[in-house]
Image (cartoon, rainbow, N blue to C red):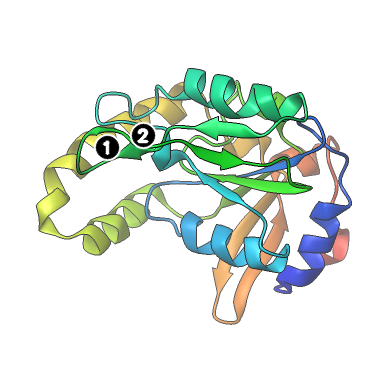
Amino acid sequence: MTDLADHARRLRALPPSCGPVRLIAVDGHAGSGKSTFAGRLATALGDAPVLRLDDLATHEELFGWTGRLRAQVLDPLSRGEPARYLPYDWTARRFGPPRTLDPAPVLLVEGVGAGRSSVRPFLAALLWIEGDSAASWEQGRLRDGPGLSEFWDGWTVAEQRHFAGDPSLPFADAVIRRVPEGYEWLEGPHATAGASHFVTDGEA
């Protein structure tokens, strides 16, 4: 199915996973279209907040943001309190003024590694954006231009290393495939194994 409204309804019906919040991870390779999908899903969810992991990573810690995510976001939300995090400024290379995330019924966390093992206990669902890594990286390079080619050289090595040691796809509840009319939702390995099933058989 490509109807985001119907899937949004299913996500809202899931049990809370992080205090009162249903935390939904949108993971996939860099350049796979996670940000666009998360934005559209957030709209279908009634303008649900989106936490982008690019705001927690840094040049020196591309995947070393787990501690910040836990302390600034996950722990407060799990207590039913607003989260306050310091977004990283990729141009100035420093953290900026704090932003607040209130405990919404559904909150999306989007970025490479959003479904990592240390985050999964807080998730109501893990969505994986389908896409070959090399093709996704090429799309990302085209999007960002030649000025960031050196950054992408380092990123691809770091992403390969991350997913080799801490893969997300095997634990995905749904795999999201881009199609001309929108997005097709397929059962992920986690749902197929019987651990989760908010995508019905007719949608696979």
Q: Give x and y (percent) for residue 126.
A: 67, 42
Circle 1 SS class: helix
Say which amino acid is labelled 1.
Trp
Residue 7 visible in the snapshot: yes
Circle 2 SS class: helix
Q: Give x and y (percent) for residue 134.
A: 32, 50
Q: Looking at the figure, which quarter contains the N terminus?
A: bottom right
Marks 2 and 1, how far apart at CA: 6 Å
Query: Mark 1 highlights which residue?
Result: 155
Relative vertical location of residue 67 with respect to residue 145 in this rendering, above or below: above
Q: Residue 142 sits in which quadrant?
A: bottom left
Q: Give x and y (percent) for residue 38.
A: 57, 58
Q: At 64% across and 61% down in the image, what residue appears?
A: 42
Query: Mark 2 highlights which residue?
Result: 159
The one nearer the camera, 157 or 82, is 82
Q: Quick one: which residue is furthest to the front in this view? A: 97
Q: At 43% across and 56% down in the image, what residue appears?
A: 32
Say which amino acid is labelled 2.
Glu
The one nearer the camera, 109 or 139, is 109
Q: Looking at the figure, which quarter contains the C terminus?
A: bottom right
